[in-house]
Image: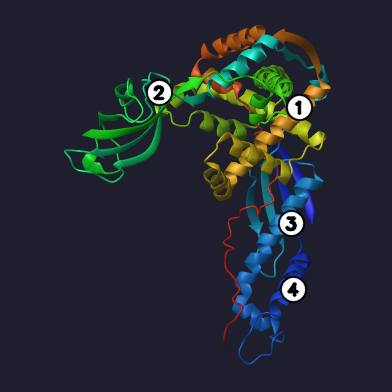
Amino acid sequence: MKVTVENKKGLNKDIKVFIDKKTMDSYMEKKYDEIKSTVNLKGFRPGKVPREILKRQFGKAVFNEVLDKVLKDTSTKALEENKIKPAGQPKLDLKTYGEDKELEYVLSVTELPKVNIKGISDIKFDQYSVKIDKSETDKRIKEIAKNQPNFKEVSSDTKASEGDLVTLDYNASVNDKPFKGSEGKNTQLTLGKDLFLKGFDKQLIGVKKNDTKIVEAVLPENFPEKEFANKKTKFICKIISVKKPEEVKIDDNFAKNLGAKNLEDLKKLISSQINDEYKNSLDRLAKNQILKQLEKFKIDEIPENLIEEEVKILSQGMSEEDAKSSNKNFEEIAKKRIKTGLILNEFGEQNQIKVSEQEIQTEIQKQLRMMPGQEKMVMDFYQKNPSAVASLRGTVYEEKIINLIKEKAKFNKKEITKDEAEKILKDSQNQTDNKSSEAKKETKTSIKPKLISKKTIKTSSKSKASIKKNSKK
């Protein structure tokens, strides 16, 4: 194989590749040997079909398969040996090809620019730690207790009031006509929450144990039995019990019911939880500080094809006129995003950062925990959408890079109170809200460079013909 690299302009290169006829013949010979043992032709024993017969029957299909393989192998090798990383899919132009001929083609590529990342160790960012006051922890625990009340049954002559738990059986009807689901047993309602039907709870205020109360309410618009939707309905309710809420005692037993060892352990867990809530948000601010500084790094030339691709993404959903008027601004945003992506990608490669399948599964499991009850839907989504998994991989890859940059960069450690953390986050949010939609897009970043693909490079030839394994002479 003979390779010649010609610089056309800037990052654009033409790679001329020549493979002599002898080498091409060896590829063809190997392919014919491979299929000879599998082809079954009438009149010939398996593995004994003459090459000329095979060539007449399968010559075109064999050549197309060989051509695809040679193009894939040699183009990848030519790029790797010359240390060229294409920005996007190279274009391939076949000059000479055919059976019993040499192969000559030109690979036109836009090369990724050289990136200098020496300045990363000089990056500075704020690393916050939030000091959680004991009163904040106690306040959070009291809120948890308030949302998990105990109810104690009261005497039969005690009337129900707002906040009480009422247990009842009911029979419902529309114009004295029952319907599917018109009966309910041991239905529990906390009066005042209005979670059953609008206005239902209020009509139960004042009932006592063993009372029978008629309640009228309107069935919802989305009621399964369409003929009864939006219809006024009569509920005959038999009150089984009335329970009053009791203040939950915050002690070791309360803590154990929440999964902690004791109350002291619960306080530590809650304090850590509050800290993590602020830490995650403050870490995003630190990440933005790092990304903003990466934008100032110098890269001599940004590949035009990557800019065009990014502008298309930024202008998605816009009218042609709006996209045209925003084009110049989008180009500047695209350059910053691509530059940041190139730097992150180079840092990741130099530090041999990889994303394992275990890390992908861990991230998916994290998302499953965030969507209780919808685990199967989330899992099915990732199983049916490889692009979603690829996107997730990119996110994990970027986070690993940012975390390593933090280790190598210079941080300014700041211990702040919860109130100070809230102010910092609020100020940051206000700054974001005041930006235009274009500026908002500018703050986002992702690893955009497309390195050499392992897939066969597309050619102008049609090489999809398949070799038939069972043919008759």
Question: In the image, residue 149 lies at what x, y percent?
Answer: 52, 23
The answer to which of 300 and 421 lies nearer the viewer is: 421
**Between disc 2 and disc 3, whose residue precedes?**
3
Q: CA distance from mark 1 to mark 3?
A: 36 Å
Mark 3 highlights which residue? 73
Residue indicated by mark 4: 29
Q: Is residue 426 at least partly visible in the picture? A: yes
Q: Residues within 10 Å of mark 2 (few under 14, many from 20)?
A: some
- Front disc: 1 or 2: 2
Q: Amino acid at mark 4?
A: Glu
Instruction: Work out whether mark 1 precedes mark 2 in sequence or the reverse, and give the earlier one.
Output: 2
Q: Which residue position is annotated with label 1?
A: 403
Q: Nearer the viewer, mark 2 or mark 4?
A: 2
What's the mark number on residue 193?
2
Q: Are marks 4 and 1 in contact (CB under 8 Å)?
A: no
* Callouts 1 and 2 close, C-beta under 8 Å: no
